[in-house]
């Protein structure tokens, strides 16, 4: 047991091969629940690898919920919920299913509808307008600025030193010269036919293909371009989702969660259920009791708590979705910005029953000027989309779609995201260090390195809203965690059971959401000092 031929790893890094091997053995029952894993030093000696390799593999397994650490005792395998069939990304089983699904779709007749094609001259004007215009962050999920009324701080006359509810970093760091070149090449090379295709309901075949390739390389998702749907921001795709799945369903959202989700689903005349969280993710028992048949979740980095859904809970969710006509909407809004270890595997990538819909946006990576998001549908829903909603014209400019496809294919997008991730990690470290120095033992953090936001916890006798108001008066805009708790009165639908993760209140300790992409490294000490002065 726990002997792996490290020479068989192929092109994989040592830690990744070891992580995958142990994950496979746990998922398939070769390692029993509760079984103790070898110590890091013992396994390093047994396999002839460095201690760093073992630590990296174990850390990733802990992050995903396959093993747990007991202080001074070691590491133990977690008890995973039974599943009828689990597919690991990159497995032969997974590739075969993807190939068969692609062959089926190839036989489908899904003629594009080029209605409402905009003139090329209009597209040039659109591009010029988009770079100079910044839509509200409420257009992009999840954001801190589209808060419920009780979340808003009292306006202050003090000059704003930092706004932890908003960021322009992606727009600031965008390589505009590379983007401008992609636009120019698109204008000179693309035909009227390709522009017409981009105006069809699902969007440009070139961009859908580029996204499918990106997901295959970065997220381990074997998807066909035919499964990808492009939309002008997440809000547009929410509307399409309700039309596709049906307004008579009850849609479950996480509590605490992204406030605008409730409002957007309600505006589509859908019932909403708020479901509580625990340390493993959304509460499946409460989800079952709510009567919901669609659950909108953020398993890789939940907003705002930062919880990463464990492997066991993921299996429970997949089993829940297999029962009856149910679906999971996987909102993967900032998975590209995980700063340590491998990205958390997607639910879509291990879903054998085709009950998971995958949603992502370019808002975090490209900025608010690029109002583009995308949806990946299971094969049967992709076919339904073409039949029922294929008459729509796409809501994103054909020129922007084709330019973004070039931008991705030429590697500019990946390099840009890497730069953003590196910058955000350095800023996070500088901010955390400065806050520790300013507050000492009164302050603690959760969710570091998991994405673009993390939780700051402060021991204080003052309530969160009072502290937020004092920070605003000092020029620091900050969002209390308690501001994101949903209530049944919002929708008239059931609320999930109360749990530790969603009981943020006005009592000590106070918890706040911080964005690591909201300030510069140089600003961190001054911001920490100003916040400490405001909360003294």
Image (tube, rainbow, N blue to C red):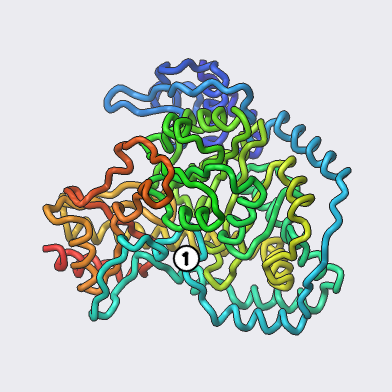
Decide if residue 50 is in sight here: no
162 left or right of 125 in image: left
In which quadrant will I find the C terminus?
bottom left
Q: Is residue 175 above or below residue 210?
A: below
Decide if residue 232 is in sight here: yes
Q: Position of residue 142 (x, y in %)?
A: 46, 57
Residue occupied by mark 1 = 138
Q: Residue at x 34, y 50 (%)?
A: 485
Q: In front: 22, or 373?
A: 373
302 left or right of 365 in image: left
486 left or right of 108 in image: left
Q: Residue at x 77, y 65 (%)?
A: 198
414 left or right of 80 in image: right
Q: Residue at x 66, y 80 (%)?
A: 126
Q: Is residue 396 above or below residue 276?
A: below
Q: Position of residue 20 (x, y in %)?
A: 56, 31
Q: Residue at x 17, y 49 (%)?
A: 507
Q: In front: 393, or 195?
A: 393
**How many marks can you see?**
1
Q: In front: 409, or 322?
A: 322
Name the quadrant containing residue 201: bottom right
Q: 10 Å neighbourhood of mark 1: few (<14), some, or many (≥20)? A: some
Q: Position of residue 121 (x, y in %)?
A: 75, 84
Q: Position of residue 310 (x, y in %)?
A: 45, 34
At mark 1, the secondary structure is helix
């Amino acid at each position: 047991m726990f002997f792996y031929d490290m020479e068989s790893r192929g092109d994989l890094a040592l830690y990744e091969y070891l992580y995958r091997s142990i994950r496979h053995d746990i998922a398939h029952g070769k390692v029993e629940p509760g079984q103790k894993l070898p110590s890091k030093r013992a396994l390093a000696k047994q396999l002839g690898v460095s201690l760093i390799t073992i630590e990296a593999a174990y850390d990733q397994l802990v992050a995903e919920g396959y093993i747990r650490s007991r202080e001074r005792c070691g590491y133990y395998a977690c008890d995973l919920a039974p599943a009828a069939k689990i597919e690991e990304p990159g497995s032969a089983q997974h590739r075969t299913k993807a190939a068969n699904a692609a062959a089926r779709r190839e036989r489908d007749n899904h003629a594009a509808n080029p209605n409402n094609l905009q003139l090329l001259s209009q597209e040039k004007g659109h591009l010029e307008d988009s770079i100079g215009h910044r839509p509200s962050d409420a257009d992009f999920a999840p954001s801190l600025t589209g808060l419920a009324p009780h979340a808003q701080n009292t306006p202050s006359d003090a000059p704003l030193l930092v706004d932890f509810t908003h960021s322009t970093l992606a727009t600031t760091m965008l390589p505009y010269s590379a983007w401008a070149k992609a636009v120019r090449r698109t204008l000179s090379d693309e035909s009227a036919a390709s522009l017409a295709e981009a105006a069809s309901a699902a969007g440009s075949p070139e961009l859908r293909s580029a996204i499918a390739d990106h997901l295959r390389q970065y997220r381990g998702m074997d998807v066909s371009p035919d499964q990808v749907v492009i939309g002008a921001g997440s809000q547009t795709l929410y509307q399409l989702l309700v039309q596709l799945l049906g307004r008579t369903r009850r849609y479950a959202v996480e509590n605490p969660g992204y406030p605008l989700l409730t409002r957007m689903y309600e505006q589509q005349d859908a019932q909403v259920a708020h479901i509580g969280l625990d340390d493993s993710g959304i509460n499946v028992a409460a989800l079952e009791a709510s009567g919901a048949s669609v659950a909108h979740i953020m398993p890789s980095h939940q907003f705002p708590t930062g919880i990463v859904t464990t492997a066991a809970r993921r299996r429970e969710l997949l089993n829940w979705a297999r029962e009856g006509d149910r679906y999971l909407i996987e909102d993967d809004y900032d998975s590209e910005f995980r700063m340590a270890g491998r990205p958390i595997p997607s639910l879509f990538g291990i879903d054998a029953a085709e009950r998971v819909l995958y949603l992502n946006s370019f808002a975090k990576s490209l900025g608010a000027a690029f109002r583009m998001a995308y949806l990946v549908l299971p094969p049967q829903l992709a076919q339904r989309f073409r039949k029922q909603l294929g008459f729509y014209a796409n809501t994103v400019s054909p020129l922007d779609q084709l330019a973004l496809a070039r931008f991705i294919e030429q590697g500019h997008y990946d390099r840009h995201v890497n730069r953003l991730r590196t910058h955000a990690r350095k800023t996070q470290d500088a901010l955390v260090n400065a806050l520790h120095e300013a507050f000492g033992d009164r302050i603690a953090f959760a969710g570091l390195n998991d994405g673009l936001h993390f939780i700051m916890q402060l021991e204080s006798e003052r309530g969160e809203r009072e502290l937020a108001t004092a920070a605003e008066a000092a020029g620091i805009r900050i969002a209390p965690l308690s501001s994101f708790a949903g209530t049944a009165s919002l929708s008239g639908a059931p609320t999930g059971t109360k749990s530790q993760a969603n009981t943020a209140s006005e009592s000590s300790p106070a918890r706040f959401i911080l964005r690591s992409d909201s300030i510069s490294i140089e600003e961190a000490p001054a911001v920490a000092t100003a916040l400490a002065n405001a909360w003294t």
